[in-house]
Image: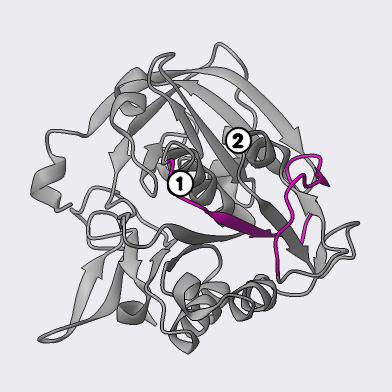
């Protein structure tokens, strides 16, 4: 999706805060009334929010869930700077200005019906949005692996799904995904009960190694999270010769391709090129970036 192709799909909305829930680790789940965005958003896209009237620069935040019929969107974010700390003070009934949906979404391929979704920290929301879309595909068999070094922003519960290749004691799952019929597993180095004690890539490798050649040929990897995690996921995908799409997180000012403040170097068929994460991404082919 190019900058030009997005011009008719970007909307500035005064989005009313419908709810805001706080979780340990300065994490917040916010629901906004944003009908235009909810109608058009696709997994991997984001919105650009004004966090507070006193702070002119917006903040880019990934979309986690949308309901086109009810007209709401949900975002999960961590309060780490002035903008997100001010956003954490918003209460139901408050109004924030939102631009979106922005960016190039994930691209699904019917010939790869075993998508592996890997999310780390605040990179979890795009994976949940993608899983929501995949659960509507009857032939699709996704697996979601989520990692966090702070408490997960939900109460984990034992998964109802057996996943061959994964350790038997790794049973913690995200309840929402379980309810959707999508198997998930959690990883952390913090010793959380039922979670894999290690990196998301180590858990993913165990699953991939258990697949036969025909099943492995049906896998495509999707990931979002911290840069070191994405680099490790890209290396894992290369190890197993799998296609991989990653969603990058970068600081940005305008969010719509004008300032070029969020550029990254990407390999192309004609050599290295600088691409804007906001409109040329945030989704890129992993091997082009790492």
Label 1 to label 2, Cα distance in Å? 12 Å
Residue at image position (24%, 28%) is 11
CB of mark 1 within 8 Å of CB of mark 2?
no
Q: Position of residue 61 (x, y in %)?
A: 46, 44
Q: Circle 1 — which element?
A: helix
In the displayed structure, does residue 96 sit left or right of residue 211? Answer: left
Front-lying residue, 92 or 82: 92
The range drawn in magenta is 138-164
Residue 152 magenta-highlighted: yes
Q: Position of residue 81 (x, y in %)?
A: 59, 51
Q: Position of residue 252 (x, y in %)?
A: 36, 56
Residue at image position (38%, 39%) is 47
Front-lying residue, 12 or 259: 12
Whether 84 is drawn above or below 141: the answer is above
Q: Position of residue 198 (x, y in %)?
A: 77, 74
Main secondary structure found in the magenta portion? loop
Residue at image position (73%, 43%) is 153
In the displayed structure, does residue 123 sit left or right of residue 56? Answer: right
User: Which residue lies under the disc numbered 1?
Assistant: 130
Residue at image position (55%, 25%) is 31
Number of other residues with Cα within 10 Å of mark 2, as a class: few under 14, some 14 to 19, many 20 or more: few
Identify the disc placed on residue 180.
2
Q: Which corner quadrant of the image does residue 12 belong to?
A: top left
Q: Which corner quadrant of the image does residue 225 belong to?
A: bottom right
- Between disc 1 and disc 2, whose residue precedes? 1
Whether 150 is drawn above or below 243: the answer is above
* Foreground: disc 1 or disc 2: 2
- Quarter holding the C terminus is bottom left
Residue 97 magenta-highlighted: no
Number of other residues with Cα within 10 Å of mark 1, as a class: few under 14, some 14 to 19, many 20 or more: many
Whether 175 is drawn above or below 92: the answer is below
């Amino acid at each position: 999706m190019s900058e030009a192709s997005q011009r008719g799909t970007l909307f500035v909305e005064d989005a009313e805060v419908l709810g805001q829930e706080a979780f340990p680790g300065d994490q917040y789940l916010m629901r906004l009334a944003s009908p235009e965005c909810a109608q058009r958003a696709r997994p991997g896209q984001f919105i650009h929010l004004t966090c507070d009237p006193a702070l002119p620069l917006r903040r880019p935040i990934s979309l986690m869930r949308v309901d086109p019929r009810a007209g709401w969107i949900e975002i999960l974010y961590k309060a780490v700077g002035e903008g997100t700390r001010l956003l954490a003070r918003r209460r139901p009934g408050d109004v924030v200005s939102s631009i979106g949906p922005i960016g190039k979404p994930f691209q699904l391929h019917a010939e790869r019906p075993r998508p592996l979704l890997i999310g780390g920290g605040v990179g979890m929301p795009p994976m949940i949005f993608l899983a929501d879309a995949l659960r509507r595909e009857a032939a699709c068999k996704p697996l979601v692996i989520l990692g966090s070094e702070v408490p997960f922003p939900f109460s984990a519960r034992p998964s109802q799904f057996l996943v061959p290749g994964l350790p038997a004691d790794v049973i913690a799952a995200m309840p929402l995904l379980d309810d959707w019929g999508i198997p998930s597993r959690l990883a952390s180095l913090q010793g959380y009960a039922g979670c894999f004690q290690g990196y998301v890539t180590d858990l993913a490798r165990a699953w991939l190694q258990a697949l036969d050649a025909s099943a492995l040929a049906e896998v495509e990897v999707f990931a979002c999270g911290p840069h070191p995690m994405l680099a490790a996921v890209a290396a894992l995908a290369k190890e197993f010769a799998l296609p991989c799409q990653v969603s990058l997180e970068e600081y940005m000012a305008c969010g719509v391709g004008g300032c070029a403040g969020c550029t990254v170097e990407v390999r192309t068929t004609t050599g290295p090129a600088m691409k804007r994460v906001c409109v040329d991404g945030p989704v890129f082919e992993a091997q082009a970036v790492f």
